């Protein structure tokens, strides 16, 4: 009988945490025991895993006894506080927050792009999951970079409210209903109403005028791609429940024709090419929702520069942008590194 692994999910009742449970089940991950951890407010609730009810326990520093892999999705402060405790108990942490991403001793991993980096987990016992928008972008760009060497990226993101968690999903739903019924809509999650609106702000603004979300994409892309690619980003929140969309412009050292780009992307891991504009077929958030592929289309040459391409890239931010990516990392970890 193949070995089974004891798994803890921290933030199990959140949007990403519940998706992690689902991904482990869907992908038939060899789970021995599963421990669901959350705040004291959620302790005592039950969630289902493989047809059995599992009670949610309160997260404490003693929660990780006997745990092999801990999947964290409870925010940066919780990860900073509890990942070291999990590591001391013998678990490897795969963290979905931004807490450890730019730590030089922590690998930042997208399995389709830099799976070899997982080997560096031994330095701190932690592997970082990148930002959801960064993940889908580098999945789409890796085959193009390997062929033509990307010099510069200009990306604008159109991000679903699920990226802010369950409260934001509820807020969009409630606001939409209120407005359609002629009543005023209240906002608590975002600084302005999100229903029937777009907000050119995701996370707090920094001194350089960019938001934290935008600078995450800049810094994380360079680390994951192991390259000095110059990146500039604009991140926008849109009234969509699931699925982040991105308009990406790249400049390359070597020319990549549209035909070559399609050939490279058709054979790329984790990518689904959806690019038949004559029949109005292109990536859309409603098609990406619920699946793990990164959809790529609207590929065309940038006629304003010598070696440029434009792409439209869409993925489910809760699945590939978070939960699925973490479980994929865990799969490689048990296959190649853990005994």
Image (cartoon, grey):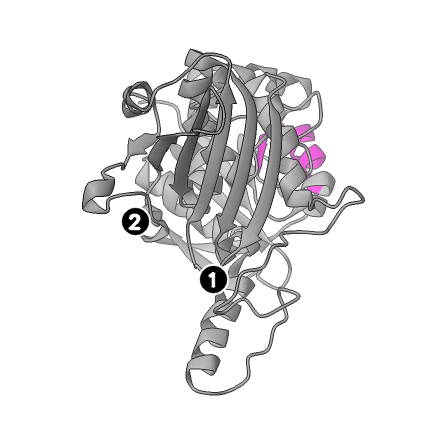
Can the viewer see residue 70 in this picture?
Answer: no
**Does residue 86 belong to the magenta stretch?**
yes
For the residue pair 324 and 249, the one nearer the viewer reads as 249
Residue range in magenta is: 82-95
* Residue depicted at x 57% and y 62%: 42
The residue at the point 29 percent across, 33 percent down is 272
The circle drawn on residue 287 is 2
Where is residue 20 shown, x and y percent of the image?
A: 44, 44
- Residue to which mark 1 is pinned: 239
Residue 40 shown left or right of residue 161 in the figure: right
* Residue 4 sits in quarter: top left
Q: Is residue 196 left or right of residue 66?
A: left
Do the residues bearing badges 1 and 2 touch, measured as CB atoms within 8 Å? no
State which tag comes first along the sequence, 1 or 2. 1
Secondary element under disc 2, as helix, strand or loop, is helix
**Is residue 275 shown left or right of residue 218?**
left
Pinpoint residue 316: horizontal percent, then vertical percent: 40, 45
At horizontal 60% and vertical 39% (from top left) the residue drawn is: 233
Q: Position of residue 275 (x, y in %)?
A: 27, 36
Furthest residue to the left?
279
Is 28 situated left or right of 148 in this image? Answer: left
Q: Given the current orientation, which residue lies at the most extreme front position?
A: 304
Task: Tell me the element at label 1.
Answer: loop
Q: Residues within 10 Å of mark 2 (few under 14, many from 20)?
A: some
Q: Which mark is residue 63?
A: none
Q: Position of residue 144 (x, y in %)?
A: 42, 20
User: For the N terminus, which image quadrant?
Assistant: top left
Regarding residue 257, the answer to whether it shows in the image is: yes
Of residue 117 and residue 205, the one placed in the foreground of this image is 205
The residue at the far right in this view is 207
Quote the CA–CA distance across marks 1 and 2.
16 Å
Residue 262 versus residue 318 in the image, above or below: above
């Amino acid at each position: 009988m193949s070995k089974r692994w004891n798994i803890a999910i921290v933030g199990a009742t959140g949007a990403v945490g519940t998706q992690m449970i689902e991904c482990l089940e869907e992908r038939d991950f060899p789970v021995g025991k599963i421990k669901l951890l959350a705040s004291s407010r959620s302790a005592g609730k039950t969630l289902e895993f493989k047809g059995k009810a599992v009670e949610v326990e309160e997260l404490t520093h003693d929660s990780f006894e006997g745990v092999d892999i801990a999947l964290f999705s409870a925010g940066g402060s919780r990860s900073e506080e509890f990942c070291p405790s999990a590591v001391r108990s013998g678990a490897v942490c795969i963290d979905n927050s931004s807490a450890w991403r730019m730590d030089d001793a922590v690998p930042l991993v997208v399995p389709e792009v830099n799976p070899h980096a997982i080997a560096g987990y031994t330095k701190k016992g932690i592997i970082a999951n990148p930002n959801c928008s960064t993940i889908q972008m580098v999945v789409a760009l890796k085959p193009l970079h390997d062929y033509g060497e990307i010099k510069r990226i200009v990306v604008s993101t159109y991000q679903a409210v699920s990226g802010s968690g369950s409260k934001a999903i509820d807020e969009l739903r409630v606001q939409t209903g209120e407005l359609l019924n002629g009543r005023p809509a209240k906002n608590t999650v975002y600084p302005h109403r999100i229903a029937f609106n777009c907000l050119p702000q995701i996370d707090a603004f920094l001194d350089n005028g960019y938001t934290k979300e935008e600078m995450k994409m800049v810094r994380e892309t360079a680390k994951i791609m192991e390259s000095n690619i110059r990146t500039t980003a604009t991140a926008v929140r849109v009234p969509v429940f699931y699925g982040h969309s991105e308009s990406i412009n790249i400049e390359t050292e070597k020319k990549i024709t549209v035909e070559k780009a399609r050939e490279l992307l058709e054979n790329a891991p984790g990518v689904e090419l959806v690019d038949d504009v004559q029949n109005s077929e292109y990536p859309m958030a409603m098609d990406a929702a619920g699946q793990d592929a990164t959809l790529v289309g609207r590929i065309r040459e940038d006629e304003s520069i010598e070696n440029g391409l434009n792409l439209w890239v869409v993925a489910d931010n809760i699945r590939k942008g978070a939960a699925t990516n973490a479980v994929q990392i865990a799969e490689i970890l048990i296959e190649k590194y853990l005994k």
